[in-house]
């Protein structure tokens, strides 16, 4: 199944922009390069954190369904890192804390 980021009015489906193409064009990172020179994709980081947060549910009252809440907490905790200013900070460097991101999610 194909998913589309945008349709084009009056154009056939073949001309619409597929979501995968849009995602490839937009790379967002969670952190600057590590000691190996690798960058950590933000979506990957958020999804992994969500998975870990869901694992905590087994330690909570089984009579209540907190799984969705825990998952959303993981997905949104670094939401502010999607800001262009934060991505530029990671790319170009700068003073730590100069681009606030925590208040968008976990803060």
Image (cartoon, rainbow, N blue to C red):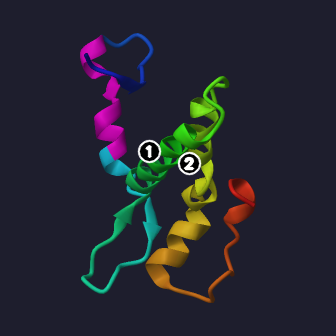
The residue range painted magenta reads: 13-23
Residue drawn at point x = 37 percent, y = 24 percent: 4
Q: Which comes before the other along the chain, label 1 or label 2?
A: 1
- Magenta highlight on residue 90: no
Residue 18 belongs to the span the image colors magenta: yes
Determine the secondary structure under disc 1.
helix
Q: Can you give x and y, in whole percent of width and height, for residue 20 in the image? A: 29, 36
- The residue lying at 34 percent from left, 49 percent from top is 25
Nearest the viewer among 30 and 89 is 30
Q: Residue 96's spot in the image, x, y percent?
A: 62, 85
Camera-side residue: 25 or 72? 72
Main SS of the magenta segment?
helix
Q: Secondary structure at mark 2?
A: helix
- In the image, residue 71 sits, relative to residue 84, either above or below, namely above
Alpha-carbon neighbours of circle 1 within 10 Å: few (<14), some, or many (≥20)? some
Quick one: quadrant of the N terminus? top left
- Of the 4 image quadrants, the one containing the C terminus is bottom right
The image position of residue 7, as x and y in percent, is 42, 20
Q: Which mark is residue 61?
A: none
Name the residue carrying label 1: 51
Q: Is residue 8 left or right of residue 88?
A: left
Find residue 101 and report its horizontal and vertical position in percent. 67, 65
Q: Which residue is mark 2?
A: 74
């Amino acid at each position: 199944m194909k998913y589309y980021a945008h349709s084009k009015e009056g154009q056939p489906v073949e001309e619409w922009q597929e979501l995968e193409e849009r995602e490839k064009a937009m790379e967002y990172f969670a952190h600057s390069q590590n000691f190996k020179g690798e960058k950590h994709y933000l979506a990957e980081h958020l999804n992994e954190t969500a998975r870990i947060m869901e694992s905590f549910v087994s330690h909570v009252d089984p009579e209540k369904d907190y799984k969705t809440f825990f998952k959303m907490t993981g997905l949104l905790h670094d939401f502010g890192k999607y800001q262009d200013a934060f991505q530029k900070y990671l790319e170009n460097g700068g003073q730590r804390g100069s681009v606030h991101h925590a208040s968008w999610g976990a803060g």
